[in-house]
């Protein structure tokens, strides 16, 4: 029965569209490759030496793959994504799940499954790009729309008071309608923004090695396109063109968006909001700073608390539910990072986000 079951498993492996392999560590040689694996040109040979790996793996991911290989040899199961360079210099993204298996002769064999996820990753990157654009535009539009809607509501209330003694029934009805419509519109926008952020944060975390400069630049460009509307200047300062970190791009950029949104609320017109990123000794440092009204010192200690009493209305009356900073802190901690801030009234605020550096390149 055992031989029959093994035969069925072998047939299943041959029919599978996933690439399945077994690799003898001592011989540095594949001892099994299914048909799907053999069809991949970049895994065509029987042997796999160090020089072959260096030519195969994308330079930015070689450190990650090498570290994972060493961990595998110590018995750790590994799941990772990495990029490979094709002969035509195109880049493919591979997902690998591997195990170390030792037989009675103490031979070390790495067995696993490889899947080409290039199309999935490109699709997901496109969704993330549009998600980031949506989040930026939501924040821009909310701040741009809330101010005039708030003015309409205030003016309608003022008209109601001025015409209180008027016997014109239609006038009262029209002014009441304007006040209700503007108030409901304001509530809808605020509810939409809060719900969007909370739902995004609640989804399961999926970490992927990412060049952080790219999504941060996309985020800032969306805000820069609105500078004439928001009357604020947005800048990105990147120490290098490539700064890698393991992040869930959708959640992390949503947290950045929320920090920028807060900066807009508490920065006067003609103010500046700046995002910077650089690599330090053992972490990646991202800052979001503004030259706005700052955070009163009495609120510093409670700023990251859920439903904090430190919540304040923005300069144009924007409300706060006291959840935003708490969720941002949670998202950063999910990434094994930390967030701190410095702020002084009438001088501005800077948030510091530290993320662990990925494996050395």
Image: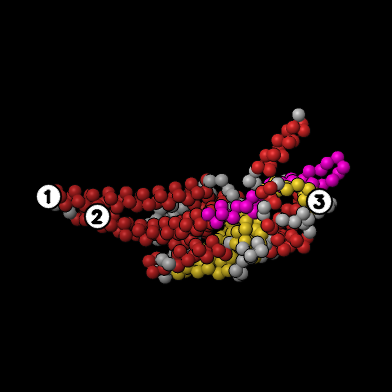
Vertical side of 186 occupied by 102: above or below: above
Whether the magenta-drawn stretch holds residue 147 is answered as no
The disc at residue 25 is 3
Q: Which residue is mark 2?
A: 156
- Upstream in the sequence, badge 1 or badge 2? 2
Q: Secondary structure at mark 1?
A: loop
Part of the protein shown in magenta: 94-123
Q: Residues within 10 Å of mark 1 (few under 14, many from 20)?
A: few
Q: Which residue is mark 1?
A: 167
Q: Secondary structure at mark 3?
A: loop
Q: Residues within 10 Å of mark 3 (few under 14, many from 20)?
A: some
Q: CA distance from mark 1 to mark 3?
A: 93 Å
Vertical side of 114 occupied by 271: above or below: below
Residue placed most toward the observer, 114 or 333:
114
Q: Nearer the viewer, mark 1 or mark 3?
A: 3
Q: CA distance from mark 1 to mark 2?
A: 17 Å
The main secondary structure of the magenta stretch is strand
52 sits to left or right of 328: right
Measuring 35% from the left and 57% from the top, which residue is drawn there?
Answer: 146
Whether the magenta-drawn stretch holds residue 95 is answered as yes
Q: Position of residue 84 (x, y in %)?
A: 66, 59
Residue placed most toward the observer, 132 or 264:
132
Q: CA distance from mark 2 to mark 3?
A: 78 Å
For residue 1, say whether it is visible.
yes
Q: Quadrant of the C terminus?
A: bottom right
């Amino acid at each position: 029965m055992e031989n029959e079951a093994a035969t069925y498993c072998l047939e299943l492996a041959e029919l599978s569209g996933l690439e399945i392999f077994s690799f003898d560590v001592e011989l540095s040689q594949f001892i099994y490759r299914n048909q799907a694996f053999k069809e991949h040109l970049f895994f065509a040979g029987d042997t796999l030496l160090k020089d072959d790996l260096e030519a195969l793996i994308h330079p930015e991911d070689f450190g990650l793959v090498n570290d994972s290989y060493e961990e595998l040899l110590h018995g750790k199961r590994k799941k990772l994504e990495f990029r490979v360079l094709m002969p035509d210099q195109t880049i493919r993204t591979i997902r690998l799940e591997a195990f170390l298996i030792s037989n009675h002769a103490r031979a070390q064999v790495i067995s696993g499954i490889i899947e080409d996820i290039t199309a999935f990753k490109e699709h997901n990157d496109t969704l993330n790009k549009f998600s980031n654009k949506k989040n930026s535009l939501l924040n821009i539009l909310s701040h741009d729309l809330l101010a005039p809607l708030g003015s309409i509501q205030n003016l309608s209330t003022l008209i109601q008071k001025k015409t209180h003694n008027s016997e014109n029934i239609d006038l009262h009805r029209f002014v009441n309608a304007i006040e209700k419509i503007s108030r409901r519109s304001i509530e809808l926008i605020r509810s939409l923004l809060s719900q969007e952020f909370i739902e995004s944060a609640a989804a399961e975390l999926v970490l992927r090695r990412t060049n952080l400069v790219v999504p941060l630049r996309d985020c800032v460009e969306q805000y820069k396109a609105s500078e004439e509307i928001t009357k604020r200047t947005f800048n990105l300062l990147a120490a290098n063109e490539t700064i890698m970190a393991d992040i869930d791009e959708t959640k992390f950029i949503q947290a950045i968006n929320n920090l920028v949104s807060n900066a807009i609320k508490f920065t006067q017109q003609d103010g500046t909001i700046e995002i910077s990123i650089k690599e330090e000794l053992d972490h990646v440092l991202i800052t979001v700073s503004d030259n706005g009204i700052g955070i009163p010192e009495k609120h510093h200690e409670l700023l990251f608390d859920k439903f904090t009493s430190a919540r304040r209305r923005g300069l144009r009356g924007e409300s706060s539910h006291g959840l935003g900073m708490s969720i941002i802190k949670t998202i950063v901690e999910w990434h094994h990072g930390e967030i701190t801030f410095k702020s002084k009234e009438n001088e501005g605020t800077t948030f510091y986000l530290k993320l662990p550096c990925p494996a050395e390149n």
